[in-house]
Amino acid sequence: MAESTVCENAPCHDVWCDDVRCGVAPPERERGPDDRVSWQWIAPLVSTLVTPFLAFWALVFIPLFTPGSVVFRCALALPLGLLIAAWAIPRRRRHIGRRVLYAVLAPASVFVLYLSCARPMPNP
């Protein structure tokens, strides 16, 4: 006689039993796009540690009262928004790429902002 994989205590043989005493486990299911991923906090955390360091480093090397300095300080809202977006995206399998992309773009945007704002003004 073949061993049944459905709990004998279940009212319907198509329903899996949640009772621990049953001893029959449901079959492994395939992972779907809405499954939680537990390690998805690593990319935003690294980005959160690197981005403020780069922003501070860039602020040290930009002269204080130049137009580029003012623009750079206002434009730091972009990396901040990318960091917030990287943390706010749900930790689901289908969002892995987007979450990592935002986490990588945050420090990269600080570097690009520094390159675009720290150029010396041309003399007329």
Image: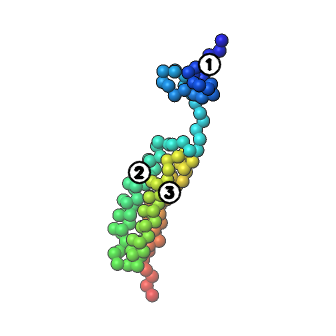
Q: Are marks 1 and 3 in contact (CB under 8 Å)?
A: no
User: Image check: 78 left or right of 65?
Assistant: right
Query: Residue at point 42% right, 67% down?
Result: 76
Residue that protrudes farthest toward the right in the picture? 1
Tag 1: residue type?
A: Ser
Q: Which mark is residue 4?
A: 1
Q: How far across and how far down the image is residue 6, in percent?
A: 60, 23
Q: How far across and how far down the image is residue 118, in percent?
A: 42, 72
Alpha-carbon neighbours of circle 2 within 10 Å: few (<14), some, or many (≥20)? some
Closer to us: 48 or 31? 31
Q: How far across and how far down the image is residue 68, in percent?
A: 41, 76
Residue that protrudes farthest toward the front in the picture? 11
Tag 3: residue type?
A: Tyr
User: Image check: 22 left or right of 12?
Assistant: left
Query: Residue at point 36% right, 59% down?
Result: 53
Query: Residue at point 45% right, 68% down?
Result: 113
Residue located beneath label 2 in the image: 45
The answer to whether residue 103 shows anywhere in this view is no
Look at the image and tell me in which quarter the N terminus lies. Answer: top right
Residue located beneath label 3 in the image: 102
